[in-house]
Image (tube, grey):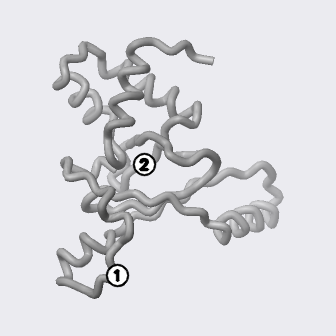
């Protein structure tokens, strides 16, 4: 078990106060803007440790950048992530679980693991592009959107 240093706690607190996913560089910049002397390598290490401990979700953005957020669900799960605003919805995907287990077994694999994250546009961002739609199509979690410059939208 990693000891809880002030640096790791600072990264954890900064991640907890961030809506959606954020890159290590962006989190480092936010920490420096608040006066923290923490180094970028330390931020990367702390984020990796938090992700390994299940305290943070980590995934790769469509651009290939590692991004992180405070984990709000324990156990294996997947995400729907808006490419425009960064809104993230944690989802269960029983069909994906069954498919992954079946396909792995068909090829003689055991102890298979997988990562499934779906990137798209949330209802609010779609409406902003396509024009207004009925309230029934608005995303129920749209209020969780961060107005910070996202996306800098895990792996369990």
Residue drawn at x 77%, y 49% is 111
Foreground of the two, 25 or 12: 12
13 relative to 75 in the view: left or right: left
119 relative to 78 in the view: left or right: left
Foreground of the two, 129 or 116: 129
Residue drawn at x 26%, y 75% is 126
The image shows residue 79 at horizontal and vertical percentages of 48, 58
The image shows residue 135 at horizontal and vertical percentages of 30, 82
Comes first in the chain, label 1 or label 2: 2
The local crowd at label 2, few if under 14, some if 14 to 19, many if 20 or more residues have their Cα within 10 Å, is some
Residue assigned mark 1? 137
Residue drawn at x 67%, y 67% is 94
Q: Of circles 1 and 2, which is in front?
A: 1
The local crowd at label 1, few if under 14, some if 14 to 19, many if 20 or more residues have their Cα within 10 Å, is few
Q: Split into 4 quadrants, where in the image is the N terminus?
A: top right
Which type of secondary structure does the marked residue at label 1 adopt? helix
Residue drawn at x 20%, y 47% is 148
Is 103 drawn above or below residue 14 in the view shown? below
The image shows residue 84 at horizontal and vertical percentages of 25, 62
Task: Mark 1 and mark 2 in contact? Answer it, CB < 8 Å.
Answer: no
28 relative to 6 in the view: left or right: left
4 relative to 65 in the view: left or right: right
Which type of secondary structure does the marked residue at label 2 adopt? strand
Is 103 drawn above or below residue 49 in the view shown? below
Foreground of the two, 25 or 53: 53
Dot label at residue 60: 2
Measure the C-alpha gap from mark 1 to mark 2: 28 Å
Quarter occupied by residue 97: bottom right
Is 101 drawn above or below residue 72 in the view shown? below
Which residue is the extreme one toward the bottom?
134
Count of numbered labels shown in the rendering:
2
Is 151 drawn above or below residue 143 in the view shown? above
């Amino acid at each position: 078990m990693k000891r809880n240093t002030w640096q790791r706690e600072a990264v954890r607190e900064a991640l907890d106060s961030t809506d959606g996913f954020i890159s290590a560089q962006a989190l480092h910049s936010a920490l420096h803007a608040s006066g923290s002397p923490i180094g970028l390598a330390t931020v990367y290490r702390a984020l990796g440790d938090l992700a390994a401990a299940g305290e943070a979700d980590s995934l790769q953005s469509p651009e290939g950048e590692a991004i992180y957020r405070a984990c709000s669900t324990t156990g294996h799960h997947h995400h729907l992530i808006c490419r425009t605003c960064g809104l993230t919805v944690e989802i269960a995907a029983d069909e994906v679980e069954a498919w992954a287990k079946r396909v792995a077994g068909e090829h003689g694999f055991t102890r298979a693991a997988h990562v499934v994250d779906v990137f798209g546009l949330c209802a609010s961002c779609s409406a902003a592009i396509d024009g207004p739609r009925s309230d029934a199509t608005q995303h129920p979690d749209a209020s969780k959107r961060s107005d910070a410059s996202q996306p800098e939208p895990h792996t369990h």
